[in-house]
Image (tube, coloured by chain):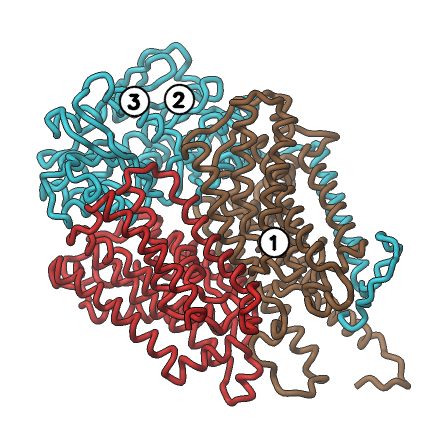
Amino acid sequence: MKSTMPIIETASPILLRKPIYQGSSARPHTRHLFAILAALLAFSGCDRKTETAGGTKNQLTIALLPKSKGNQFFLTVEKGARQAADEIGAKLLFDGPTDNDPAKQNEIIENWISLGVDAIAAASQNKGGISLPLKKARAKGVTVVTYDSDANDEARSFFINQATPKSIGETLMDSAAKLCGEEGEFAIITGTLTAGNLNTWRGFIEARLAEKYPRMKLVATKPCDDDKGKAQQEAANLISAYPSLKCIMAITSPAVPGAAEAVKQAGKAGMVKVLGLGLPSENRAYVKEGVTQAVILWNLCDLGYLTVKAAAAVKNGTLKPGATTFDAGRLGNLKVEGDNILLGAPIIFTSENIDQYQF
Amino acid sequence: MNDKNCPPNSRQRVAGVLRRMLSRQESVVFVVLIFEILLFSAIGRNFLAPDNVRNIVRHSVEIGLLALVMTPIILTGGIDLSVGSMMGLCAVAFGMLWGEAHFAPWLAACAAVAIGTAGGAINAGLITRLGLPPLIVTLGTFSLFRGLAEALTGGSKSFTDFPDSFLSLGNSLAFGVPVQAWVLVVVSLFVWGLVHRTTAGRAFRAIGFAPEGARYAGIPVGKRIAFAYTLAGAVAGLAAVIFVSRVGEARANAGTGYELAAITAVVLGGTSIFGGTGSVYGTLLGVASVAVLSNGLSRILSISDISRELSGMLTGALLLVALAGGALTKALAERPHRSKPADPVNSESAGRKEK
Amino acid sequence: MMQKYMRELSIAFVLALLLLALAVFAPNFFAIHPLLSRLTAQSPALVAAIGMTLVIVCRQIDISIGSQFGMCAVVAGVLAAKGMSLPVVLLASAGAGAVMGATNGALVAWLRLPSIVVTLATMVTWAEALRLWQQGRLLDLPAHVKWLSLGQTAGQTTLVVFTVVLVLFAAWAMRNLAAGRHVFAVGNDAEAARLAGIDPQWVTFGVFVLMGVLMGIAAVMNIAQSPQVQPTCGDGLELKVIAACVVGGVAVSGGRGGLLGVFLGFLLLANVNPALTHFHAQAYWEKAIQGLVILLAVVADGVCSKLPNKAGDSKAK
């Protein structure tokens, strides 16, 4: 092919009537390609009967969507979700994005819709964006609930609220204020600057700061890309750059042990307080050593359990809009406020109670 | 041995055809694609259902667009790592023009494409005027464009609640086919025409094969290369608009990782990363086989929890197998005619302009 | 001589400016303990940069080092958690890196596949395999791994000194050992090297294996700094390291480059973010500034090579 390629450009018209270089084996493939494209387009266009994803008769298929798949936070939620699924005899599908591509959650939901799942429980990365496929799902009769991070109201029946973003933000700010004696400088380490619910919590933290703690100052907000090592380096830089820093608030779970390690290595344990939203299992050692003063979370297993129970209940009609309580199996009767099912208040893990929790 | 006086019998003819077919990577990928479709329609749930096929098409349009314009670039022996970040920048620009400057969506879309073109022109200028290696220039713009997108939004701002008329671009059907698929068809025809039916397309191959030779033959090398990179920027802007319409949100992290997916598709489809050989239908086959693989695995419910990781691993393996297969069959085909000892590593690239 | 070290001098100049600005506006940057911690945290990436320099000088590229790093870190962590001693852990980590490097090397050297595509494929494959294995769980490490059982200051000093010694040794070896000169020869012109009696395939293979071994060492240096291992710890490492090499003057067309430039380039890029923090600037400028630094370095290279007096340096492209 290379030897037959003419390399002298003449004043030939820009459009060649016949390609000179193509070998004869090319044309059959072009034909085949057009055939495949035509077939795919034709399939796109016609209607056919499809099977549903239900397994045995009456077995529900519930699909759980985390914000990201490789995160211990959501893996713990999944554990609780599986418990509930086993209890009610439902099938649980679990899939989520593994990178920072904002389209992945939408693609996964659209795939589930076409698989014919009965219910989708989603923790949204992009509130506006995810509402598009969730609305499509509802239009097809799929039950949609959200947990951890809400979507638009019309996109879901209920939002399983571990704690309202407002109460999360306020608990964080209040705990930090208590640790600092309500005055001094503090910094926030967040996951990424684009994450939806992290930004919502930051908004409430800053609102609470402005409202109640005029003698405290937020000096910096740094992202760590959910990488513990980066969080450690950011925390070390913050401690060095702001000598009067009194507290580091880590609002994404990998950052809490990272920040604690940085404080410990800088020899400032106890002088620079560390608190954040993290898992007890990842922070147990630091809490016991007194490097991290408070880890705030909610029972992730319970969150997963409640989400699946609620999704199943909405699907078979036991939970209807307008309900004020919901019987959540081993969690007892929980409050329903409007379309929010409340798990409860955030739990503050300290050295006294951290051993009670094993996740 | 073929004797010129004896015509080949039917067995030798079939063997010859098979050898010619397998020596082209496009054929191998084609076979892989057919195999995937057959496999998944047998063991996947509802794989061939129309809404699933529509999903496969809809989810791969942006990567398809990027892979299409990546083809002429790789044909010239270059590479463009910045197209994904360009998507992010254009998406943010689109969002800001619509959300804050209150442009009409179509006007903001045109502006986004214009910004993409400008970004592509920056790449083109640095590569052609200053003679810098494309790998390095686009590595820098990869960071720079994404960084600009994040700086413009403070990292966190996003734009949503677009009007339904705009969202229909990414989410509804025209003549039973997803709307953005028609855009992909038009761009495919354009790029195919450019690469396979114009002198400019021939110039891309010539430049990839022997840049100095192309220059001596009178090909305007600088102009052609600049055109390829600028086109890539413009189409990245278009892809950004389609992406925002499909996802319903304009964010700085739009298009993350798409450049590597595009390069994977192009190389899988038989275009040599060293330049000089390749085809647009190979690229389309590459895009299709990766999209079908990833979707098909997710339709097998019993492994649905690990289908994502599995599809990533298999894509990587597929790429290696396709390349190794192509290299091995070529080596086997060349063996009887070889008159000099084995070429050293990178013999193809000896004397060529490096990325 | 000035022209030969133009790149190193210009980076040193910019770095000096940055350090001067920090000394004036943010002298806290130079406090000993934070500085030592910062250097220790940056050391694993610098070790990786040594390997990448060799790979790029050999006219190849390796974008799978992030996945290799994560895999080696997890292998080391799992073995340490089982109670293995440090030397065994180090050996195993380096061994795992060598195996991954050998895979890359074999595909590139003997099957003659393009390195960017091979390492793209292996990057994805190993990252997904790691995700299947560990699923993002944080791995707890036993106490004897922390600081290589030396205590914090001694451990940090050891790691930093080790890195500096390694850089110096590698810089010397690249110029003075036959193996080092072979890498330059193959990167310059593989055919000429073959005619001169060097086997380009073994050199290429060796360069990838060495990269893997260095990643294994870097991974152990990393896990010694914290009591938990996160499997995604290598994400984004390849871009940081390649950027440092490019800024440091290593030519992507192969055959040219030195570790001094890479060392300076690495220091410059790695300290953009800490500098921003110390200047009390906003976080979202980090990527834009890094991209700008890379482009400036590259443009300066291009402009310099177009200057009329430059002695026929056609490899500058």
Q: Which mark is residue C5?
A: none
Q: Which residue is mark 2?
A: A313
In this rendering, does residue A79 appear at all? no
Q: Are marks 2 and 1 in contact (CB under 8 Å)?
A: no
Tell which of A135 and B343 is nearer to you.
Answer: B343
**Alpha carbon of mark 2 to alpha carbon of mark 1: how far?**
44 Å
Type of residue at label 1? Ala
Against C88, residue B183 (above or below) is: above
Residue A252 vs residue A47: left or right? left
Against A183, residue B291 (above or below) is: below
The quarter of the image holding the N terminus of chain B is: bottom right
Dot 2: chain letter: A
Residue at screen point 76% across, 43% down: A38
Q: Which residue is mark 1?
A: B265
Image location of residue B80, percent across then percent down: 58, 53
> Which structural element holds mark 1?
helix
Image location of residue B108, percent across then percent down: 61, 28
Dot 3: chain letter: A
Image chain in cyan? A
Q: Colour of chain C?
A: red
Q: Which mark is residue A204?
A: 3
Q: Colour of chain B?
A: brown
Label 1: few (<14), some (14–19) or many (≥20) C-alpha neighbours in 10 Å: many
Image location of residue C110, percent across then percent down: 53, 77
